[in-house]
Image (tube, grey):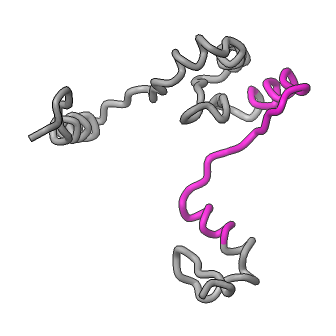
Amino acid sequence: MPASGSEGVQPKLDSFQQQAWQGEVLPPVNDFESVIFARHPELGRIRKRLLGLGAKYAAMTGSGSAIFGVFNNAETILQARQALSGEHSFAVSFLSRTRYQSLWRRSLKPHLKGAEWPPLSLYAR
């Protein structure tokens, strides 16, 4: 029986599966944003600035370690980077799992034993 005030896990799983199977794509939501932005309005301004610079989506990560924007093309990213030149900003791109694992292995090759994933360190006991 679910705890008082809780709808339980199964209805949440059912809802998730129904949305996934229907192919419905909903924008991600960070429930902390409204609270954090009310307390630290400058973070909300950064999010709005990213959107104004052409981000198709901008949000706060997890519990607020960063504000990020998702851009559609390299030109818009370059323009945003120039506009944010005095700020702590980084341009990054998404990697496939295969590409990530390849880069990880190449970077740590001298310190790995075997080729399995996840990699095992030569120094681990």
Location of residue 107 in the rendering, given as x and y in whole percent from the top left corner = 75, 71
Magenta residue span: 76-104
Q: Quadrant of residue 56?
A: top right
Q: Residue at x 65, y 35 (%)?
A: 65
Query: Considering the image in quadrants, where does the N terminus appear?
Result: top left
Task: Say left or right for 68 vs 3.
Answer: right
Q: Residue at x 60, y 24 (%)?
A: 58
Q: Quadrant of residue 110?
A: bottom right
Location of residue 27 in the rendering, given as x and y in whole percent from the top left corner = 44, 26
Task: Say left or right for 119 vs 83.
Answer: left
Q: Residue at x 65, y 30 (%)?
A: 68
Q: Residue at x 64, y 69 (%)?
A: 102
Location of residue 2 in the rendering, given as x and y in whole percent from the top left corner = 14, 38
Task: Say left or right for 28 vs 54.
Answer: left
The answer to which of 39 and 82 lies nearer the viewer is 39
Q: Quadrant of residue 70?
A: top right
Assess whether residue 69 is covered by the magenta stretch.
Answer: no
